[in-house]
Image (cartoon, rainbow, N blue to C red):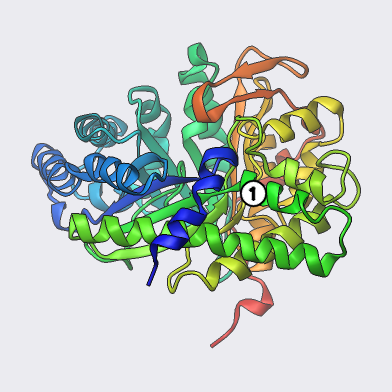
Amino acid sequence: MINLYEVTETNKMIEKENLDVRTITLGISLLDCIDSDLQKLNDKIYQKIYDAARDLVKTGEEISREFGIPIVNKRISVTPIALIGGAACRSKEDFASIAKTLDKVAHEVGVNFIGGYSALVSKGMTPADELLIRSIPLALSETERVCSSVNLGSTKTGINMDAVKLMGEMIKETAQYTKEEDSLGCAKLVVFCNAPDDNPFMAGAFHGVTEADKIINVGVSGPGVVKTALEKVRGANFEVLCETIKKTAFKVTRVGQLVAQEASKMLGVPFGIVDLSLAPTPAIGDSVADILCEIGLEYAGAPGTTAALALLNDQVKKGGVMASSYVGGLSGAFIPVSEDQGMIDAVTAGALTLEKLEAMTCVCSVGLDMIAIPGDTKATTISGIIADEMAIGMVNQKTTAVRIIPVIGKGVGEVVEFGGLLGYAPIMPVNRFSCDAFVNRGGRIPAPIHSFKN
């Protein structure tokens, strides 16, 4: 059981070290909403989400007041819409109408994002999958709170290169559709390899088909807490360093466990998982890059960065998994550029490049995240970057992702402002050598030999 002493112990972390519960995410299955009539489908989707989530924000606020724990976001994830809309949708506009319904109900219940405008196409695309993917630019340009994700590969199935090529084109198209907002639509669009069914973090959250009808997942974040703990053992050896990270991760995860249990009880919805991800914000003192510097690097990106990040990720998971019976989602360290002031500083100083970030994704929690690139970058180049990241996930049996933003009208050296938790980012240079012939081959990259586990 979680006792009051554990809550009291976290007060300092909350007040001085930026500890927060980043999100309570209510997962909702829409499988029972499927209908061949588009209007009836939209009506059913609206009603199911509204009935399930109308008390979510109020519940989060009550828990926050009772325990003094900041709960930054309340969010919803739903069953991938490609599965739900297939019987009714005959055009991009049909699918986009569902996105508008999701956006409307998100506004009504007061959540800041709703995820699940998604397709799972790691081995192939159905007509509905392809139609949804082609509707993404329209859907994201006409909504405010809808997030979209597409799973393009897995260790078991390989990489769907047809979908990789298509997503490069859709990311460019989304950037064009939202160019008046510095291509902000791309910040709500992520592609995955090995996407988990229970991820509470946006933009990648969706409610997997293996989940219950409704579920509560909680995402906790505490980069500032970890950094402060490491400051106290500065100069100590790696054994002390690792023990300190593990103990800190345990305490942080207990906070998430407490919030998840309370939310589950108050909403009458089963508890799913706690996702302990060191997810940074632009706030000073809330940076994963600063933790890497505290470990001993001048900047994130310096030699030794990948090893330091691997150590951090592993110890966070070892500590967190002891604090909750159900740790899941992504759980580890996020390395988004625009959302982490230390990462921004590293890029500005020339210490961090796209290629080094790719190396770091081999050992981090997700992948290439919130990276702004020149708006004239070719779609095939974006597809090549995606393919590289999917390969890392496939071969290493881990989740990897790409959330990349080609900012229309801007080039290397300029800065783009997204605002809020999304922060700001310097435009990073991209390798200009062509991969057109590779991307245009079509077909599927087979699963690796070690995928055969049966």
Of 307 and 177, nearer the camera is: 307
For this orientation, the residue located farthest to the right is: 303
Query: Is residue 129 rendered to the left or right of residue 448?
Result: left
Q: Which residue is mark 1?
A: 367
Crowding at label 1, few (<14), some or many (≥20) Cα neighbours within 10 Å? many
Locate residue 258, reporting x and y percent: 38, 60
**As displayed, is residue 364 above or below residue 110?**
below
Query: Is residue 159 rendered to the left or right of residue 411?
Result: left
Of 304 and 127, nearer the camera is: 304
Locate residue 235, reporting x and y percent: 89, 55
Q: Residue visible at 72% across and 68% down?
A: 243
Q: Quadrant of the N terminus?
A: bottom left
**As displayed, is residue 110 above or below residue 190?**
above
Query: Is residue 219 rendered to the left or right of residue 88?
Result: right
Q: Is residue 124 visible?
A: no
Q: Is residue 13 visible?
A: yes
Locate residue 6, reporting x and y percent: 46, 61
